Image (tube, rainbow, N blue to C red):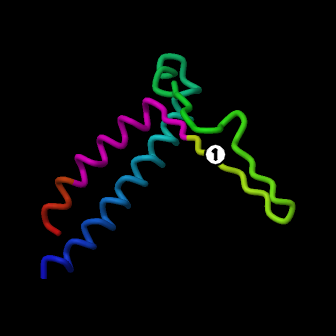
Amino acid sequence: MARGGNWKKTIAFIFFLLAGITVGYVLSVLCSKVDFLTWLAMSKRVGIGSDSPLVVDLSVIKLVFGFTIEVSIAQIFSIILFIILFNKVGKNM
């Protein structure tokens, strides 16, 4: 019986995490247009091969390897808020 509730909690956690990322992105876009809230839109891009990705050309197949993530302050705050919200909602699952 515990396993049945476990997958529901995992799906709910992924949903809350994605919702936090999405809401944070929207907030950072909206805050970038308001003078005293521009600090919420500050972001940092981190990645492997973001400027020049690793390319393996095998004539038939061309493989490109790279990974980039960009996180803003508004996204960090909203992810934390949604995780707290998940902890309150997830107790009943």
Q: Is residue 8 left or right of residue 60?
A: left
> The disc labelled 1 sits on which kind of residue?
Gly
45 shown above or below 81 = above
Q: Where is residue 73 in the image (x, y as percent from the top left)?
A: 43, 29
Where the C terminus falls, by quadrant?
Answer: bottom left
35 shown above or below 51 = above
Q: Is residue 85 left or right of residue 73?
A: left
In the picture of the structure, the residue carrying the numbered disc 1 is 66
In the depicted view, which residue is nearer to us: 63 or 79?
63
In this view, which residue lies farthest toward the front?
A: 58
Q: How crowded is mark 1: few (under 14 residues within 10 Å), some or many (20 or more)?
A: few
Q: Residue drawn 30% across and 40% down?
A: 80
Q: Residue drawn 66% across and 49% down?
A: 65
In the depicted view, which residue is nearer to us: 37 or 14?
14
Which region of the structure is painted magenta? Answer: 69-86
Q: How many marks?
A: 1
Q: Quadrant of residue 1?
A: bottom left
Q: Position of residue 54 (x, y in %)?
A: 70, 44
Q: Main secondary structure of the magenta part?
A: helix
In this view, which residue lies farthest toward the right?
A: 59
In this view, which residue lies farthest toward the bottom?
A: 1
Q: What element carries label 1?
A: loop
Q: Residue drawn 56% across and 31% down?
A: 45
76 shown above or below 36 = below
Q: Where is residue 5 in the image (x, y as percent from the top left)?
A: 19, 75
Q: In this view, does 80 lie to the left or right of 50?
A: left
Q: Residue drawn 71% across and 51% down?
A: 64
